[in-house]
Image (cartoon, helix red, strand yellow):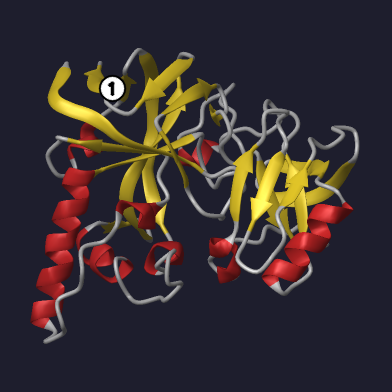
Amino acid sequence: MRLLGVRVVGISLYPVKSTRAHPVDRARVERWGLAGDRRWAVVTPDGEPITARHCRPLFTVTASTTPDGGLLLTAPGAPDLAVPLPEPAHTVPVGFVNLARAAAGGDAADAWLTATLGRPARLVWLADTTARAVPLEVGGQPGDVYHLGDTAPIHLITLGSLRRLDDWIAETAVERGEELPEPLEAGRFRANVVLDGASAFAEDDWKRLRLGTVDFRVAGPCGRCVMTTIDPETRASGKEPIRTLARHRKSGGWAWFGIQLVPESLGEIAVGDPAEVLP
């Protein structure tokens, strides 16, 4: 069923998990997610993931993929650093769900991140994109794999749902006698794909979706965390949108917003592509 007027209006990559968004006009869809998205991550010396939830300086880091598959890291006040593609056999322990080891990013990257973040840090890379299975409890099926993100290969939100959420947040502010907040930026949710033209929360009923010529299975909704309460530009935090989502969209201990996708075919998606709900 073609969703009349519903189109892709934004695509973002996060080459290193929890760093700044990298908007693109088009992206290649792989089994594990979008090419260039979340193949890298920052961890502690013991391998535990470091994210902007608790390390906000990560929001100041911009990562871009170089033609050879490596990275270029930049941050205010720091020298640019080119990181070559790691040796896949040189791995270190990591504490990601369904992943015990990842390739080490190298001493230079570790020193750069440690200085930039103000805490000991290491860079790691997912060399084997078939190594990490999508957890069954978030809608994974046998054979589903994903990158170093939280739960699934691709995350999608719709502007229709975001506008409804903005309305709810405004209603909450009025009820509490608070100043009306500015509408939330879509980037607050760190989605890979943003659609416009769909009615609010229409995505709750989608089982499969075609974007352009690429088919996806909806693994399930996305449970939101404190990350959405942090403005990625100012790094200031507040109570929204979790406070209002918990009022309108909470079940099973989570506040839900957006959906998680698993690719069923490969290809390329682009800004402007139409969206179609599949049976």
Front-lying residue, 238 or 14: 14
**Which residue is rendered at x = 46% and y = 27% of the image?**
262
Front-lying residue, 142 or 6: 6
**Which residue is rendered at x = 23% and y = 67% of the image?**
244
13 displayed left or right of 55: left
Q: Position of residue 220 (x, y in %)?
A: 37, 38
Asked which secondary structure carries label 1, the reply is loop
Q: Quadrant of the C terminus?
A: top left
Q: Position of residue 112 (x, y in %)?
A: 77, 61
Residue occupied by mark 1: 273
Q: Residues within 10 Å of mark 1 (few under 14, many from 20)?
A: some
**Which residue is rendered at x = 22% and y = 66% of the image?**
247
**Which residue is rendered at x = 14% and y = 44% of the image?**
200
196 displayed left or right of 133: left
Relative height, residue 184 to residue 62 (above, below): below
Relative height, residue 117 to residue 5 (above, below): below
Callout 1 amino acid: Asp
Q: Position of residue 242 (x, y in %)?
A: 32, 67
Which quadrant of the figure has residue 47?
bottom right
Front-lying residue, 79 or 116: 79
Residue 46 in sight:
no
